[in-house]
């Protein structure tokens, strides 16, 4: 019985790690597709595909949206506008200026920001062990991502400043969106499916007019069939399943812990990189070990 209770108590953490793994797979695809598609358009395409998939899932499952107050809808929509519409666009833009490793390093700012915001606005207390786990996990990810690689050259100072600015913006937007979503979960029985749909809808609310303004001057470049197939696969794994699992994690565990574990996706990229023939250094392995130690603290000592 105690083993079963432990498994149930870790559902949120397991959902967060699963989301991180799926986002790692999707990120590999987005990094290649993003070379030919503008970040705003890519964000819009993946969001629209995920919304259709979520609507189909809700219809098949018969999941009913419980009564929600106006503020609950507002919080979910704002959460999506900030975390998905603004945050994902800022993240994809930062990739252009910093490269994947440095941008992902900037995103590790999100978990401590989330924990602090949750503490200030939701009075969500974290134990000393949980804080230690968060710090260990962040240190491990930072150790992996800050490694110098021959693929990343020296950036122009202006580009570096822009990349850092967009990276910080993405982290703040992600943290704020998570806290807004957690605030609704704390007072309602809304399912993770509906939460993901409402958040994605909020993201589209800001992306559709944003892309429309952009296409007035430069036009909308439709992706090729091959790119569409790649975006669909990445949207299914990273956006549809990923955000569904992320919302499950935020619903079932503390926001700071959920965001820390969902931000371990760079660690899951390492075996993918090894499978693709990339050499994995001892430093990268050591960073993974530190991050896993932090995850173990979050699992068993919180």
Image (cartoon, helix red, strand yellow):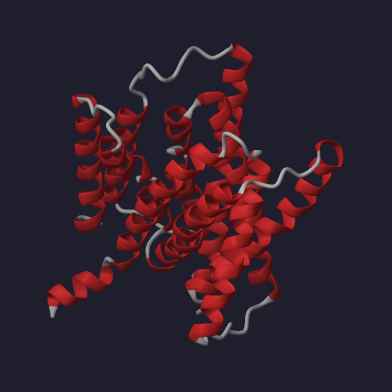
In the displayed structure, does residue 198 sit left or right of residue 281? right
Depth check: 34 or 129 in front? 34
Image location of residue 299, percent across then percent down: 23, 57
Q: How many labels sit on residues?
A: 0
Up the image or down, 119 lies above or below 107; here it is below
The N terminus is located in which quarter? bottom left
**Which quarter of the figure has residue 163?**
top right
Depth check: 231 or 226 in front? 226
- Tell me what residue is drawn at x 25 percent, y 49 percent: 295
Image location of residue 214, percent across then percent down: 80, 41
Image location of residue 28, percent across then percent down: 43, 42
Image location of residue 240, percent across then percent down: 50, 62
- Tell me what residue is drawn at x 53 percent, y 57 percent: 232
Depth check: 10 or 282 in front? 282
In the displayed structure, does residue 170 sit left or right of residue 105? right
**Which quarter of the figure has residue 14?**
bottom left
- Tell me what residue is drawn at x 50 percent, y 79 percent: 189
């Amino acid at each position: 019985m105690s083993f079963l209770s432990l498994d149930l108590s870790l559902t949120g953490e397991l959902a967060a790690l699963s989301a991180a793994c799926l986002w790692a797979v999707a990120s590999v695809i987005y990094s290649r597709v993003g070379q030919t598609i503008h970040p705003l358009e890519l964000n819009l395409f993946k969001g629209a595909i995920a919304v259709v998939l979520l609507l189909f899932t809700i219809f098949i499952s018969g999941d009913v949206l419980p009564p929600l107050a106006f503020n609950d809808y507002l919080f979910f929509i704002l959460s999506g506008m900030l975390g998905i519409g603004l945050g994902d666009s800022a993240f994809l833009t930062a990739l252009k200026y910093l490269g994947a490793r440095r941008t992902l390093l900037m995103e590790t700012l999100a978990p401590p920001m989330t924990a602090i915001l949750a503490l200030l606005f939701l009075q969500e207390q974290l134990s000393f062990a949980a804080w230690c786990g968060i710090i260990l996990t962040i240190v491990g990810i930072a150790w992996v991502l800050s490694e110098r690689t021959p693929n990343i050259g020296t950036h122009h100072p202006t580009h570096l400043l822009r990349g850092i600015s967009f990276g910080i913006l993405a982290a703040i937007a992600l943290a704020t969106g998570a806290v807004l979503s957690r605030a609704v979960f704390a007072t309602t029985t809304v399912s993770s499916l509906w939460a993901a749909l409402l958040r994605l809808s909020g993201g589209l609310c800001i992306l559709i007019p944003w892309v429309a303004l952009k296409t007035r001057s430069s036009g909308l470049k439709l992706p090729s069939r091959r790119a569409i197939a790649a975006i669909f696969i990445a949207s299914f794994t990273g956006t549809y399943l990923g955000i569904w699992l992320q919302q499950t994690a935020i619903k079932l565990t503390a926001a700071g812990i959920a965001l820390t574990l969902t931000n371990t996706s760079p660690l899951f990229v390492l075996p993918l990189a090894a499978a693709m023939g990339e050499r994995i250094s001892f430093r990268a392995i050591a960073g993974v070990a530190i991050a896993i130690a932090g995850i173990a603290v979050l699992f068993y000592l919180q």
